[in-house]
Structure formats: structure tokens, C-alpha cells
Image: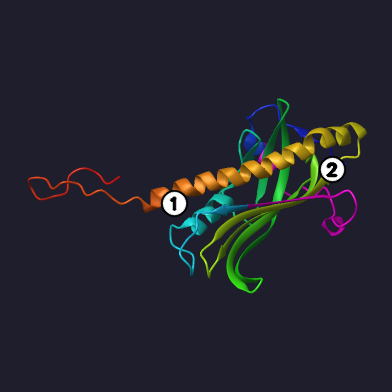
Amino acid sequence: MRLADLGLGAGDVDARLAALRGRPLNYDPDEVSGPGWQRDDYRQPLPAEAPGDAEQGGSFEIACRLSRDYAFSDPALVEAYFDAEAPLEGREMLLVLHVLGLRLDAGVRVSHVVEETRELRGRTARLFGWSYRTLEGHVEAGQRDFEVWKLLDSGEVEFRTHSISRPAARNPLVLAGFRLLGRHKQAEFGRRACARMTLLTEAAVARSQRPLETAPATREGHLGGEQP
């Protein structure tokens, strides 16, 4: 079993990220229904759209982009490093966890991406979602899912995150530390992710809906100034 990785600084991120390639998971996904696994669910309404398909530049489209970029993560809790040009599915991510002044490197790999129309209790919804799983060296073991939903009949948009996890190590000291701080940090991550997703989505929607200002005509009849 690989011990938790201690990140001593922000330097050499590329090498630390590259080291995750090919690294195995630190748990068996087929065994997450057993005892000792903790489950968390968070749901956050986002600015609604008009009923029907997702609007260009609307709340759903913006939230999907923010989710794909992991922008909802508060860097005071979790910093994320990854190759933004790489396909989302299979993407390796170096997460740097901030705990009691320490920086713990935590590797994850995106295991599943979904983008589809789905029936939800008799209502048609548009869904974009993805999941990552923890790699050897992560202090936790498990999976976290991120989803953006739009109900097409009402225009409601919602962000959801779900996780199932347990401590990765059986060391009594690590287990005690996880019970003392781990659950608190998990809950804090979920709450802040929802709050940041709301804030960032609202700000981006407001920018996209801001009307363009018309610049005054110059003496030659051309438009002067720059568009905002």
C-alpha cells in the first residue's frame, strides 16, 4: 500500500502530475457497498432558464463548463492541476489538499463522463456529469460525482455532487485523523463547491446577458471606441 504523498510546495507540478499516469486505484470499485463507506450528497439550484433545450450562453451551458474546469473547488481547500487540453474522460488530476497547514498530494482519474437526455421521475432532463476515482497515495478511497441538470419542462437548473469514500489507510493514526478532520473537510468541500458554483454561474450569466453599448459615430461615420 502506498503512503499518502506530502506535497511540500507548488513547484514541479508537471512532474507530480505526470507521475499519476498508469497509477492504479487505491480501492476496488466493486466493494463500495460494504461497511465503512460514507456517502454524501449535495444539491444546489442555479439560475433557471426558459423551458426547452439548453440556451446558448445560459446557466446550464455555463455550469457545465465550470464543472468541466473544476472551477467550483475552493483553492483554499483543494487546488487542482490537470491538462485542460486532454479529453475529460481518463483525465488524471493532481489535487492538493490543504489540511492544518500541510499540502497533501491526492491523485484522481476521471472514470466516467455522461452527456445525455434522461427521464427523471416522469420529466425530461438534460444531464452533463462526470466522476473521478482515487489513486494510490490518496488519503481517501472512493469516488466523487459532479452533475449539472436542466429540467426541460420548467427550465430549472441544478448542480449536484455525490461521493462515497472511506480512509485509504488502516493505520490507527490515519483513521483517527480522518474521523477528526476528514468528515468535516468533506462536508466543507461539498458546501463550498455548491456556493462557488452558484456565485460563478450567476456572475457569468449576468455578463452574458449584459447589453452591448453602442459607441458614438465619429466624424468619418465609423464607430469610435471599443465594445465592452
Residue most extreme to the top: 101
Specify the segment rendered in magenta.
Answer: 16-43
Compare residues 208 and 106 and report the one nearer the observer. Answer: 208
Looking at the picture, which amino acid does disc 2 mark? Ala
Name the residue that disc number 1 marks: 205
Q: Position of residue 172 (x, y in %)?
A: 92, 34
The residues bearing labels 2 and 1 have C-alpha atoms spaced at a distance of: 39 Å
Q: Secondary structure at mark 2?
A: loop
Numbered circles on residues, count? 2
Tag on residue 168?
Answer: 2
Give the camera-side residue of 24 and 79. Answer: 79
Q: For the C terminus, which image quadrant?
A: top left
- Residue at image location 72% in from the left, 36% down from the top: 105
Quadrant in which residue 115 is drawn:
bottom right
Question: Is residue 217 something that shows in the picture?
Answer: yes
The disc at residue 216 is: none
Would you call the spot at circle 1 few (<14 residues within 10 Å), some (14-19), or many (20 or more)? some
Q: Quadrant of the N terminus?
A: top right
Residue 144 visible (yes or no): no
Magenta stretch holds residue 21: yes
Residue at the spot 43% in from the left edge and 57% down from the top edge: 57
The residue under label 1 is which amino acid type? Val
The extreme front residue here reads 154
